[in-house]
Image (cartoon, grey):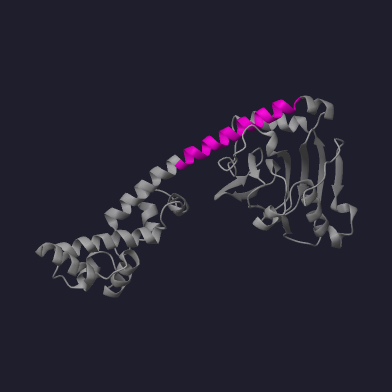
Amino acid sequence: MDAPPRPALAVTVSTSDVDGRDAAAYWRDLVCARFVEVAVRPAAHDGFAGVVRHREVAGIGFARLASQAQQVDRTWGLVARSSEHHLLANIQLRGQGFLAQDGRSAVLAPGALVFVDSARPYTMQFDGEFAQLVIRVPVSMLPRRTLADATSVPLDGPARLVTDFLLGLDDVDPAVVSEFVPHTLGLLDTALGWAARRTAGERSQLAITRERVHRFVRENACDPDLDAASVAAGCRISKRTLFRALADDEPFTSLMRRLRVERAQQTLRSNPRLPLAAVAQQCGFAGAAQLHRAFQRVTGGTPGDHRRRSATFDTN
């Protein structure tokens, strides 16, 4: 269940408050109480350490934490157990981490601002010692209520103005922070807009890349050695970018199979007497059996069915 309201005065809690054998379990409880419910898996239980300095002002939580290597997961089950919806604005202070949410991933480098939506699953991983400032804001307080396009997008550059402001708020009197809450929400909304626009820009670029990949595979589908590595090299992109470009479209293997079957259909129509083994060789398949299986996967029929339909159509 979500944590109850907390006082404005800063509270510091640390794994040093408990026996070392209980440090990892105690840390999990601290993270759940000060942020949202998550599953925390420290990389090493022996000698594990972490500290959180937390306060809440006018409904906004400020938590500065430092700890060691660990993985943090918020699953659908944990989301379902929560009755509150929060935006988590993560400012990486030291060390480096990895965040994945909404099908996107981000490297958490020092100085970066990255948003997380508590209403959907996410994973964070830290391979060594790290420190963060996390601002926890009820989504009901934000002008921008849709967060899906703004999560897992690392912001730098102009976003440094926002991070400097938020870091400054963490160090001043609670009464002053209360006066700046409207400005805080406005700046967060602006940063969310930047993140959403960056996501839109990435989608546009991925759409262009996807068209390049489709064109390259279409032009080279008959090459039996065509694979993801050669397509990526031909399009001058990484394999990771190749798979990202096709993530919302059609898997690479399905795309290649479909385009080869289309080429085989054309070949069967134009050369109705050509043996299936020759058709397979001309269209990039390893043999007639592979051609037959691909035809069934793509069309629901066989090359022979297609040849007979084409012959019937030609005679009519």
Residue at (29, 72) in percent of width and height: 292
Assess whether residue 185 is covered by the magenta stretch.
Answer: yes
Q: Nearest the camera: 243 or 150?
A: 150
The span picked out in magenta is 180-203
Q: Is residue 175 left or right of residue 207?
A: right
Q: Position of residue 251 (x, y in %)?
A: 42, 58
In percent of width and height, residue 305 lies at 23, 70
Question: Is residue 49 visible from the viewing direction of this image?
Answer: no
Report whether 118 appears left or right of 315.
Answer: right
* Residue at 71% across, 39% down: 138
Judge whether residue 45 can be spotted in this image.
Answer: yes
Q: Quadrant of the C terminus?
A: bottom left
Question: Residue at coordinates 86% horizontally, 47% vertically from top-left?
Answer: 13
Q: Nearer the viewer, residue 313 or 21?
A: 313
Q: Is residue 290 left or right of residue 164?
A: left
Left or right relative to 163: residue 309:
left
